[in-house]
Amino acid sequence: MAGATAVISAGTATAVQPIQWQSCETLFNLEPGSVPEEQRLECAIVDAPLDYDNPDGPTTPIAVSKVSPKSGQSKSAIFGNPGGPGDDALMFWANRDTGIAPTDLYNDHDLIAVQPRGLWGSNPIQCDPSLASPFALNPLHDACYGTNGAYIESMTTENAARDMDFVRQSMGLETIDYYGVSYGTKLGADYATLYPEHTGKMMLDSNVGPDWAWSEQSAQTTEAQHARMYDMFEWIASNDETYGLGDTPLKVFNRWKAISDQEVGGPSNMIPPAAQEGDLPNELRGTPVQQPALDVINTTAPGRARLEGLWNAVTLRELTNNAASGMYDTAVGASFNETSWPMVANILSYYDKNQGEIPRVSPVAAQRIRNAKASDNTQFNTQHDMFRIVTCNEDQTVQNPLAIGSAELDAKTGGDRLLAQAAGQRAGSDCFGYQPVTEPIKVSGEGLEQKPIILQNVHDAVTPMGGAENMLERMGGKLVTVDNGGHGAFRTGNKFIDDAVADFFTNGTVPPDTLPGRPTPKPLPTTLEGEYPSNTVGYGEGENPFAQAQRGISQAVDAGAQAAQDAVEPAGQQAQPTEQQAQPTEQQAGAEQSGTEQDPAATGQQAQNTTANDGGAAEDPAEKAARDAAAGIDQAVGALTGTQQNGAQYTVDQYYGQ
């Protein structure tokens, strides 16, 4: 599709026209066969008001998809949103009627997804980095608002909710049911607040705190990551017989720190977990001085960590580090999902025993990687841009430059990196230089005939438990908890949760207060060749997708290191694409083997969802190679987490003997 300015039309939006469903392949010019007929997927575009305060003014196209019920008789229309903001909603329900989604939903309901404005199919944004001054306080703001300010300003959660109701009207529906996950919970709460009379059953999964929009939400997430990393060290310690990394969280932390402290970008700088009896000398264990000794160790731990970090900063250790193991980013990324922990433990155990195998780069390449990481906040891709645009359009945090600067100084002089990041976020660092255009809706469930179900993983580090409690306070309803980590409870292979959600939408059955979670993950085979324990499903006989993903991580790190080396080749020499770049990663292969859904619109999305780098100033090849190297580890971590969450589906019904 064309850029934002080209698609906004001057048509009138006073009368809502009936929606016209058609083939998604035809409508979006997708590759023939990319949407199989058995999926019963249709698409449409409606022209919604650009500004709902001016309904007769310009319009903007909003893409919609529908999966029709297998039975041919729909009990209700369930609108769904995957979160973000910035996640693709159009294919939210596609490819979900086999494998990991409850069949009742696909048998008896119309499943509707409304693509938020700004994403592919709904007039995708195109930000132009050439419009951002090198001295801009917020380059993304200038690059995006400079293309079409009126359109960018319209990207708010309230307008996304109003677009949903516009689709409801075009479908001739009196009420809609709703399932939303992550940011989709705020979108659903906004809709229910604006249109309580048109809101039916509502399930909000993995909840953002409506009072936290949005800097506080980011800070809460970062702090939850920090706490969850301690849980990971504890899990690894509980499997010391397998990994040999220590039998206490502190011992495991020290082994992890010894590796991650060598990383390009600086030492890990994290306050250690609390010392336990097993961390004391044998002579002190079980004696009257045991507890006083632990109290002294734990009370002084933050200060000692701070002094060590300060010493590393003073001695410029950041400038001499040259390792590219990815151990820091891998561990931080794994805080989002405990099914990633066995892989982290295997990688750490391998490097702990084979430090000579840690990938390393030249000093010049390391500096280029540091430069690229430092400038990576402005990514200029649609998903990242949409997240920042929507949240910063709404964020009411009073930006405090002094507090932001203090947090950055803390991180650079030995402070705990994650806690310093949270402090900066709480002071407004995420949207610094970006002024809001609207206030978030103060959500309320007062007008609802049926209050929502608030579904929440207790140990979710992306949307922590406090967000669900805040949502319950504002919307009312019932809180249903699952004693798990991970982000998103529904459609992750837990039969109890999936059945409860389907029963709620199909029959109105309210779930119990708690639902069983998946079992604690088991260690991976240390040989990387064995079959993973039998409490997972979705893979063929004898396959080990976790081992495949681990090898894929190593390959991604190696490719990143090679890209960094290429960055210092003589000027004019063109870097050749590596085999890693040219071929699918083993994580991807594992996901395909597992039956993980593939987006049928991927081809169309790539064609339409262009990034702002197109048409921008040419980037120096060496700098691009360094940026690729800096992004390699983060990309590998994302693939790791995705493989774990989407592929490793625990059969909890068997685990609990039901």
Image (tube, rainbow, N blue to C red):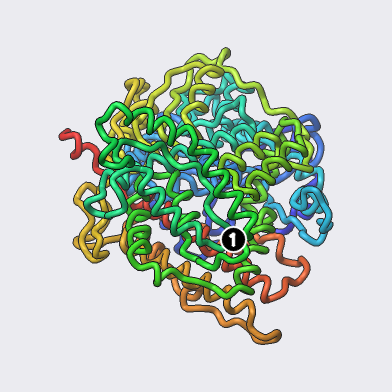
Pick the residue in front: 1 or 613: 613
Residue 459 seen: yes
Q: Residue furthest left?
A: 657
Tell which of 331 and 176 is nearer to you: 331
Q: Is residue 80 visible?
A: no
| Left or right side of 17 for 8 | right
Q: Residues within 10 Å of mark 1 (few under 14, many from 20)?
A: some
Q: Quadrant of residue 519?
A: top left
Expressed as whole percent of the image width and height from the top left, the position of residue 285 reads 27, 35
Between 176 and 459, the residue placed more toward the observer is: 459
Is 395 placed left or right of 356 in the picture? right
Which residue sits at x=82%, y=52%?
136
Residue drawn at x 29%, y 26% as measured from the top left:
288
| Left or right, residue 652 beside residue 268 | left
**Which residue is label 1 attached to?**
317
Question: Which quadrant: the N terminus?
Answer: bottom right
Helix, strand or loop under label 1:
helix
Q: Give the amino acid type for the residue marked by disc 1 in the picture.
A: Arg
Pinpoint residue 41: horizontal percent, then vertical percent: 46, 49
Instruction: Please state the horizontal and vertical placement of residue 642, each as a whole percent of the image.
Output: 43, 53
